[in-house]
Amino acid sequence: MRYWLMKSEPTSFGLEQLRKAPRRTTGWDGVRNYQARNLLREMRRGEQAFLYHSSCEVPGIVAVMEVVREAYPDPSAFDRRDAHYDPGSDPRQPRWFMVDVRLARALKRTITLAELRAHAARGLKGLALLRPGNRLSVSEVAAAHWRFILALE
């Protein structure tokens, strides 16, 4: 099993919206970075991901999600009215993909970026989120890092 971290700004989509989604499940759409798209295509049903709130007052990990549907073409790329529309994307050869995720549970507390950084030299050494300049919305989390982060809760 692999583990993931998926970033979203809580003002556009966050824990509260996921809680309110039917069956606490939603499509993770709108990814428009090739490297992040490739990671979405690697995700398998049953794998888990952290929901990370970014670009907010206190960025951090707020929940655990489960992948419930593997990668499929992202329809927002073909919808001219959607903010994620890509005029170069062809439905016959889709460029962009999405997965469906379900809220497994909210964390007891937010594990803040500052707290994660405090462990960067030892327990979380190599965590993609903590690499300078990393702005990917999707990244893989090593199993050891996953366990370490959950132990911080």
Image (cartoon, rainbow, N blue to C red):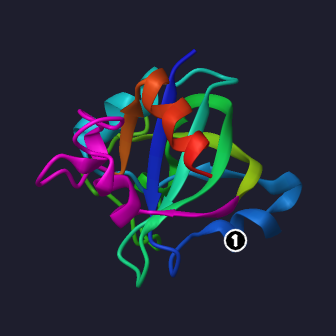
- Boundaries of the magenta span: 108-136
Residue beneath the point at 62% across and 52% down: 153
Say what amino acid the circle numbered 1 marks: Gln
Res. 93 in view: no
Residue beneath the point at 66% across and 67% down: 15
Residue beneath the point at 46% across and 74% down: 81
Q: In which quarter of the image is residue 86?
A: bottom left
Q: Mark 1 points at which residue?
A: 17
Q: In the picture shown, does residue 128 fall above or below 3? A: below
Q: Residue furthest top?
A: 1
Residue 74 position, x and y percent, is: 49, 45
Asked whether 102 falls inside the magenta stretch, the response is: no
Q: In which quarter of the image is residue 97?
A: top left
Residue 107 position, x and y percent, is: 69, 57
Say what secondary structure mark 1 lies in.
Answer: helix
Residue 10 position, x and y percent, is: 52, 75
Q: Quadrant of residue 78?
A: bottom left
Label count reads 1
Residue 151 position, x and y percent, is: 59, 41
Taking 42 as reference, is 22 left or right?
right
Q: Nearer the viewer, residue 102 or 30?
A: 102
Taking 141 as reference, is 13 left or right?
right
Taking 21 as reference, is 42 left or right?
left
Say which quadrant the N terminus sits in.
top right
Q: Nearer the viewer, residue 84 or 145?
A: 145
Q: Which of 153 and 14 is in front in this view?
A: 153
